[in-house]
Every structure is written in C-alpha cells, then in structure tokens.
Image (tube, grey):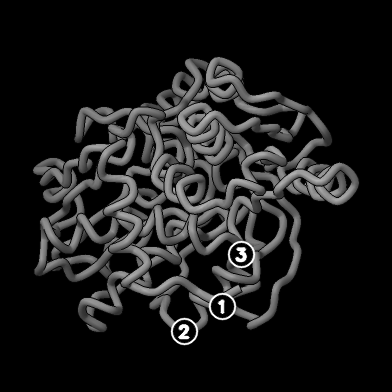
C-alpha cells in the first residue's frame, strides 16, 4: 500500500464535492476561554451521516472498477465507517455487507440498515468482526474494504483537514481523535504538505491503547481494549496509518474514558454541540493537555455525533458531578 499524497487529497475533494458541502470551522468563545487558546471546532458531525467517515466512502466507491463493484463489498465497522460504505454503496448501486460486533451502537446499526446494507454480527469487538469479514471475502470473492488500510479512504477523510487550513491558514495545532487512524493520517498528510510547522496531535483512550503503543514501539502491536467509546475501540494498530504517523505525527496523547465523558458535557454546555464519545475525544485531549495549547490557534475536530440517549445521559452525569 502506497500512502496517499496531498495531490490525492485534492483529487478526493473534487470527487466528493458533488455529494457534500464543506463543514464549518467555528470559533468557540467558551472553549477558548477555558483553554486560554484560540479554539475552533471542525464540525464533521454536520455531514449527512453525522460523522467524518462519509468523505472516505464516496471517494473509495468512485474509484473502484466495475469488476470490484459487481463482486459486492464487505467491510467491518463499529458504525460510522459502515454507514459511509453503506451510503456510498446505495449511491452507486453496489451490494454492501457489513460485519459488526454484537454490542454495536444501535443508532448506527439502524442507520446502516436503513441505508440498505446487509448486516452480520460477529464477536465482541471490532477486530473480531474484521477477521470474520476478511475470511468471508477470501472464501466468497467479495471486494474487502479495510476500515483503515485503504489509501482512498485516507485521502477522502483528509479533505476535512484541507478545509481547516483553507479556513484558518494560521492554524498552529490540529487535534483529532484516533481509532484506526485514517482521519489523523489524512490530517498529517495535509498539514505537513502545507506547512511542516503545523502540529498534529492524535488523541486516544488509554483504555484502548493499541494504536498508541504501535506508534511508540514502531511496529504494529495489539493491546487490551476496554473503552466505552466504540468509534475509537480497536485492539490493534494498522499498518498504513502507522507508517504515515511514524513520519508525520507530532505527538500522541492519551485520555481516560471519564475525560471523554466530561468532554461530551463540555461540548454541550460551552459549544452547543452534540458529540458521540469518539467525536469528543480530541477535546478531551485538549483539556487534559491544555498547557500545550495556551496562546495558540487550535482546531479541534468533532468527528461524529451518533450518540445514544443512554450514553449522553451517562456522560452528562459524569460532567455535572465532576467525578473521575
């Protein structure tokens, strides 16, 4: 796999432009005062599927051969990637099968089903579902779509970072959540191509540190996974984003799950913004490591808003209690 370049990101933007409007980059007075920085939120939750992954699916399907489309696509997901591929499949008339962990977010499950995907539930984690889908692809000839190790997906989601540097050319720091690593990889490619002095920080839950450990050790490793934030719940690092991050990522920050819950509450109260746990993770990193941001111009990506009422209530209780 060859890593995408800034040219690939520009091509992706041209490809997806007929399908999506730009998402806004809004200055947040409340968060700026809290963090003593000039804070802008990149509102990827404004996309039609409520998450940044939408960009990648259209770019991928637009570039597949007719043979690949005719075989049907199979992929694994905790929800937002699956919605992206399901939506793109419906747009292009392509059969899509999605493997999900048995405890998948019901809001995302309902959305994928409504988009016409065929759903399969297998195992307790994303990686259990992924391994099942990889086996079916080998046995039955589907075109397997890896949720992360796909250059076209990375180029597609990288268009969000391109919008950030166009709307805020003087940005000092970009902060994004990391699950598998497609979003952060796209941001690294864009930021370092435009201006190597732009710092890019990945934020992950310490309860699912496989990507962090892979980055630190310089090789893909597995680790226990126990985070409630399903959008960043992976138990392994992935080769392509790890290769990109090894060259371009400035730092990798860890937070705990209650940091993420409090960030959900902060977004509601300070920025009038609804985020799912993965969508609030970058803000959790900003709060936990606020000294790094002081006096800087900072973009914080809200990567998705597909949260259940139960998760929202639980997070608001933690936020209001100040526990953890």
Which label's residue is closer to the chain start, 3 or 2?
3
In the image, what residue occupies the spot 20% across and 34% down? Answer: 271
Q: Calculate the distance from the C-alpha at mark 3 to the C-alpha at mark 1.
A: 11 Å
- The residue under the point 55% across, 51% down is 64
Q: Mark 3 to mark 2: distance in Å?
A: 15 Å
**Disc 1 marks which residue?**
243
Checking the image for residue 113, the label placed there is none
Residue 229 visible in image: no
Between 246 and 229, the one nearer to me in the picture: 246
Image side of residue 122 versus residue 303, left or right = right
Considering every residue shown, the one lying at the far front of the view is 66
Circle 3/circle 1 CB separation < 8 Å = no
Q: Nearer the viewer, residue 302 or 39?
A: 302
Question: On the image, numbered disc 3 is attached to which residue?
Answer: 211
CA gap, disc 2 and disc 1: 7 Å
Categorize mark 3 by other alpha carbons within 10 Å: few (<14), some (14-19), many (20+). many
In the image: residue 250, left or right of residue 43: right
Indicate the quadrant where residue 214 lies: bottom right
State whether residue 231 is above or below residue 194: above
- Residue 121 placed where, x, y %? 78, 28
* Residue carrying label 2: 247
The answer to the question of whether label 2 and label 1 lie on touching residues, with beta carbons closer than 8 A, is yes
Where is residue 163 drawn, in percent x and y?
A: 20, 55
Q: Residues within 10 Å of mark 2 (few under 14, many from 20)?
A: few
Query: Neighbour class for label 1 at 10 Å: few (<14), some, many (≥20)?
Result: some
């Amino acid at each position: 796999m060859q890593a995408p370049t800034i040219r690939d990101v520009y091509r992706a933007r041209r490809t997806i432009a007929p399908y999506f409007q730009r998402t806004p980059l809004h200055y947040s007075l409340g968060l700026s005062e809290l963090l003593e920085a000039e804070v802008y939120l990149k509102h990827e939750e404004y996309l039609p599927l409520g998450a940044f992954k939408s960009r990648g699916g259209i770019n991928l399907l637009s570039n597949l051969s007719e043979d690949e489309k005719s075989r049907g696509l199979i992929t694994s997901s905790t929800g937002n990637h699956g919605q992206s591929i399901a939506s793109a499949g419906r747009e292009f008339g392509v059969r899509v099968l999605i493997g999900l962990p048995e405890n998948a977010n019901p809001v995302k499950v309902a959305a994928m089903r409504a988009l016409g995907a065929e759903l399969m539930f297998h195992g307790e984690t994303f990686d259990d579902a992924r391994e099942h889908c990889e086996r079916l692809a080998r046995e039955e000839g589907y075109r397997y779509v890896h949720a992360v190790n796909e250059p076209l997906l990375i180029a597609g989601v990288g268009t969000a970072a391109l919008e950030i540097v166009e709307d805020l050319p003087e940005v000092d720091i970009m902060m994004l959540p990391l699950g598998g690593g497609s979003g952060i990889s796209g941001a690294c490619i864009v930021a370092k191509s435009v201006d190597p002095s732009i710092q890019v920080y990945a934020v992950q839950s310490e309860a699912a540190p496989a990507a962090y450990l892979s980055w630190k050790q310089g090789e893909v490793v597995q680790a226990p996974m126990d985070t409630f934030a399903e959008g960043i719940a992976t138990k392994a690092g992935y080769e392509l984003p790890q290769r990109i991050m090894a060259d371009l990522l400035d730092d990798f920050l860890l937070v705990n799950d209650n940091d993420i819950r409090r960030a959900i509450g902060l977004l509601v109260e300070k920025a009038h913004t609804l985020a799912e746990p993965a969508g609030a993770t970058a803000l959790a990193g900003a709060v936990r490591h606020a000294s790094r941001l002081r006096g800087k111009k900072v973009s914080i990506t809200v990567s998705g808003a597909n949260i259940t009422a139960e998760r929202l209530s639980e997070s608001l209780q933690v936020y209001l209690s100040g526990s953890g």
